[in-house]
Image (spheres, rainbow, N blue to C red):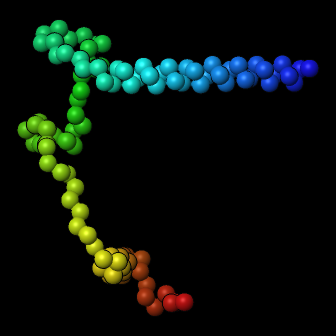
Amino acid sequence: MLHLLYILAFTILAFLAVGNLFRSLLTVGMESQRIQPFRGGNHNASSARFQAVPHPELLDDYGNVVNEPLLVMRSLSVQDAREQLDALYKSSPGNNDEAREDI
C-alpha cells in the first residue's frame, strides 16, 4: 500500500514539474519575441536587463556591429587535410620518427 502511495506522489510531482517546464518555456518564448522600446533617459535595472547587448567579438575596433561573415572556410580534400595534419605532427616538439613503428 505504501508503494502505491509513493508512486502516486511521484507521478503527481512529475506532472507538476513537466507543467512548470512548459509554462516556463512559453514565458521565455513570449519574452524573447517581445521588443522592448528604447527609453532615452529613463534607465533602471529592469529595463537594462532586456536591452540587447552584442557580444564583444561581434564589434569592430570602434564599437560598431560587424555585419560581414566572421568565418570563411574553403573546401579541402581529404588528401590535403591528411598532408597538413602529418606536417603538424612531424613539426611537433615531442615527435620522434625513430621510435614510431608503422603497423
Report x, y in % for residue 90.
36, 81
Q: Quadrant of the C terminus?
A: bottom right
The reply to whether residue 84 is visible in this rendering is no
User: In terms of image quadrants, where is residue 53?
Assistant: top left
Q: Quadrant of the N terminus?
A: top right
How many marks overall?
A: 0
Report x, y in % for residue 74.
23, 67
Q: Residue at x 24, y 27 (%)?
A: 52
Q: Is residue 83 above or below residue 101?
A: above
Q: Residue at x 23, y 63 (%)?
A: 73
Q: Is residue 45 above or below residue 69?
A: above
The reply to whether residue 80 is visible in this rendering is yes
Q: Residue at x 16, y 16 (%)?
A: 38
Report x, y in % for residue 92.
36, 76
Hey, which residue is sitting farthest right in the picture?
1
Hey, which residue is sitting farthest left in the picture?
62
